[in-house]
Amino acid sequence: MEWSLIQRRDTTRLIYEILNLAERGASKYRIVSAVSLNFRQIERYMRFLLHSGHLEFSLNSQGVQTYTLTAKGRRLQNLLREIQEELNNLFTRSLSSHKQSISRIQEVLLTEEVQHQPS
């Protein structure tokens, strides 16, 4: 199955996106908006990341809860980034190879079509 055909994000991808947003500090509203989930859905991920020590939260000067990465969260973010890059390269190569195969098939079909046309 081609990567581009996979529509649903998996848990790992969502965690990676949350960690990226929290890198510079982000409110829950900003995270919810950026990852396109509702507050109830995102709560599960936030609780998990807070409980496991990957995120921490504090109140900013306006009194808004801000989530930021811990050192443990930064390590996980870096690992997930490496995995994401590897997957992107894998599927990009796969898609490129697939397109080349289609081009070759089209060339063969066109050649056969031209050869079989009445003169």
Image (cartoon, rainbow, N blue to C red):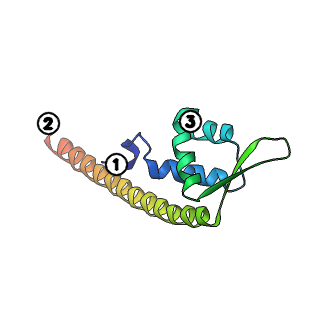
Q: Are marks 1 and 3 in contact (CB under 8 Å)?
A: no
Residue type at the position of mark 2: Pro
Q: Are marks 1 and 2 in contact (CB under 8 Å)?
A: no
Q: Nearer the viewer, residue 60 or 12?
A: 60
Residue type at the position of mark 3: Ser
Q: Which residue is mark 1?
A: 2
Q: Residues within 10 Å of mark 2 (few under 14, many from 20)?
A: few
| Alpha carbon separation for disc pair 1 and 2 | 40 Å
Q: Which residue is mark 3?
A: 36
Q: Position of residue 37 (x, y in %)?
A: 54, 35
Position of 16 relative to 9 (above/below): below
Query: Quick one: SS at disc 3?
Result: loop
What residue is drawn where x is 65% and y is 62%? 70
Q: Which mark is residue 118?
A: 2
Which quadrant of the figure has residue 19?
Answer: bottom right
Q: Nearer the viewer, residue 103 or 47?
A: 47
Q: Nearer the viewer, residue 10 or 69?
A: 69
Q: Position of residue 91 (x, y in %)?
A: 39, 56
Of the residues tagged 3 and 2, which is closer to the observer? 3
Q: Position of residue 2 (x, y in %)?
A: 34, 48
Q: Is residue 1 left or right of residue 48?
A: left
**Which residue in the rendered view is the most extreme toward the front?**
51
Please tell me which of labels 3 and 2 falls first in the chain.
3
Q: Nearer the viewer, residue 94 or 79?
A: 79
Q: Residues within 10 Å of mark 1 (few under 14, many from 20)?
A: few
Please tell me which of labels 1 and 3 falls first in the chain.
1
Q: Position of residue 104 (x, y in %)?
A: 27, 53
What residue is drawn where x is 58% and y is 49%? 18
